[in-house]
């Protein structure tokens, strides 16, 4: 049975998935003989900027709980192929006003498969893990079982994110083809939300028996994660310090945060807004708004500044227009920082309205958010309840230790995952 989002009704027509097991106690490796895992990624997985740092922290959790991890990546396509794909995209946009999605190219996928095969040739691995790696594994031929993990499917992301909108029909066909092949290729499918898992089954025919929902964790170093007792002492600062984290001002709903700031000021709330990760357009300026263009988590001092932002803020306010399963919400949860966001994509499975934050429909604008935010900021006991529930969500489900332990169980407990010997 799938993980069901508390406080929301489950669609009875939705397929049933294997339960991820919910809360998993933290601990060491569960096997006497550590697995040998090939971690496949086209980008450098050791770079804390890649996929919001998730690759880096996933690898650390796998090494802690599951076994030895070898990074198969970054992967680079041949220069000629990159030039061809760039040319196709440029001409398509120039003449047809349509984009060609180079990241889901069949030619690129074949190139990645060839590169991966050469890197793992002659080496023994018990498992291949490919996070958001549909293009990497679609054409990969191997006897080693593959775990494909993602927070979305191509069907969901197409025309949802701007980067995947207005695509050539060829791109849409290639994207769906690659997604379908990757899903069929994998012995285990792991999604960050039921929203994504449902699409895998309903849109691509994934087998529910090997489809699991495991929420993503927080991309924060263990030494920077506060103790439960420290978080329990969190109180609103007396005013309302809002934190907007995102590299895409428009997609993350930056204009709505600005509207809410103005409305809170009008209501007499001592509100301040910190924007981190992007520079808003010039028309968004206010004495109570502070902008930090970018923080590089590869740099210790900037990582510490990021942590300080989570501590000093009262609410994480990201009224996103389109999102899958934002990992910044898990990071905020580690600090007991309640989340204010939008009921879209996989967000409702992380943020439960009135429990660990505020969740409004996509139609809501700044005034509606400001009204709910003002209620929280004026009611200290309400704020404390939200903060503690937010931290509880981190401890039970939004951490990479629980994710890795459960994944390791799945990889060792399901016979068909490890006993497969057919070349695909």
Image (cartoon, rainbow, N blue to C red):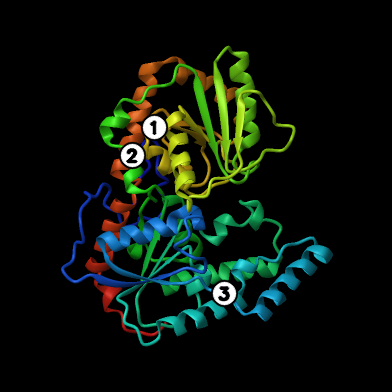
* Residue 181 shows in this picture: no
Quarter where residue 396 is shown: top left
Q: Residue at x 56, y 80 (%)?
A: 111
Instruction: Give the vertical position of 106 relative to 325 (above or below).
Output: below
**Nearest to viewer (mark 1 / mark 3):** 3
Q: Disc 1 vs disc 2: Cβ atoms closer than 8 Å?
A: yes
Residue at mark 3 to residue at mark 2: CA–CA distance: 38 Å
**Residue 309: x %, y % from top left:** 47, 35
Q: Against 60, is 326 above or below?
A: above
Task: Report how far apart the C-alphas of labels 1 and 3 lie in the structure.
Answer: 41 Å
Front-most of residues 354 and 115: 115
Circles 3 and 2, Cβ within 8 Å, touching? The answer is no
| Residues at circles 1 and 3 in contact by the CB criterion of under 8 Å | no
Left or right: residue 44 compared with residue 233: right
Q: Residue furthest top?
A: 268
The picture quadrant where one finds residue 201 is: bottom left
Examine the rendered structure and indicate whether residue 212 appears above or below residue 240: below
Residue annotated with mark 1: 356
Q: Earlier in the sequence, mark 1 or mark 2?
A: 1
* Residue at image mark 3: 76
Task: Return the x and y of residue 271 as percentages of the image width and height.
Answer: 55, 20
Q: Label 1: few (<14), some or many (≥20) within 10 Å?
A: many
Q: Is residue 1 left or right of residue 161?
A: left
| 352 or 33: nearer the viewer | 33
Which residue occupies the foreground of this view, 299 or 333?
A: 299
């Amino acid at each position: 049975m799938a993980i069901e989002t508390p406080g929301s009704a489950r669609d009875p027509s939705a397929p049933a998935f294997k339960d991820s097991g919910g809360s998993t106690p933290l601990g060491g490796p569960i096997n006497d003989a550590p697995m040998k895992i090939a971690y496949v990624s086209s980008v450098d997985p050791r770079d804390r900027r890649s996929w919001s740092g998730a690759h880096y922290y996933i690898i650390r959790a796998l090494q802690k709980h599951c076994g030895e991890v070898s990074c198969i990546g970054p992967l680079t396509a041949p220069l000629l192929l990159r030039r061809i794909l760039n040319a196709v995209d440029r001409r398509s946009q120039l003449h047809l006003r349509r984009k060609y999605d180079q990241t889901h190219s069949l030619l690129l996928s074949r190139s990645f498969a060839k590169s991966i095969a050469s890197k793992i040739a002659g080496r023994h691995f018990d498992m291949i893990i490919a996070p958001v790696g549909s293009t990497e594994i679609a054409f990969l031929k191997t006897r080693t079982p593959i775990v494909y993990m993602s927070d979305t499917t191509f069907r969901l992301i197409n025309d949802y994110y701007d980067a995947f909108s207005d695509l050539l029909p060829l791109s849409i066909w290639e994207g769906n083809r690659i997604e379908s092949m990757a899903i069929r290729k994998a012995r285990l499918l792991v999604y960050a939300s039921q929203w994504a898992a449902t699409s895998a089954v309903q849109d691509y025919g994934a087998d529910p028996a090997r489809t699991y929902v495991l929420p993503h964790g927080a991309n924060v170093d263990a030494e920077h994660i506060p103790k439960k007792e420290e978080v329990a002492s969190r109180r609103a600062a007396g005013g309302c310090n809002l934190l907007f984290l995102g590299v895409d001002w428009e997609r993350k709903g930056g204009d709505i945060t600005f509207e809410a700031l103005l409305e809170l000021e009008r209501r007499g709330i001592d509100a301040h807004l910190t924007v981190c990760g992007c520079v808003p357009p010039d028309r968004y300026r206010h004495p109570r708004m502070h902008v930090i263009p970018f923080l590089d988590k590869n740099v210790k001092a900037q990582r510490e500044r990021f942590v300080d932002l989570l501590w000093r803020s009262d609410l994480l306010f990201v009224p996103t227009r389109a999102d899958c399963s934002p990992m910044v919400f898990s990071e905020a949860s580690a600090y007991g920082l309640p989340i204010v966001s939008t009921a879209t994509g996989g967000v409702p499975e992380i943020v439960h309205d009135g429990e660990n934050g505020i969740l409004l429909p996509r139609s809501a604008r700044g005034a509606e958010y400001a009204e709910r935010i003002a209620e929280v900021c004026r009611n200290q006991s309400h704020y404390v309840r939200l903060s503690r529930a937010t931290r509880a969500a981190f401890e039970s489900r939004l951490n990479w230790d629980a994710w890795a332990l459960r994944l390791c169980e799945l990889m060792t407990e399901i016979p068909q995952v490890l006993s497969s010997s057919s070349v695909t």
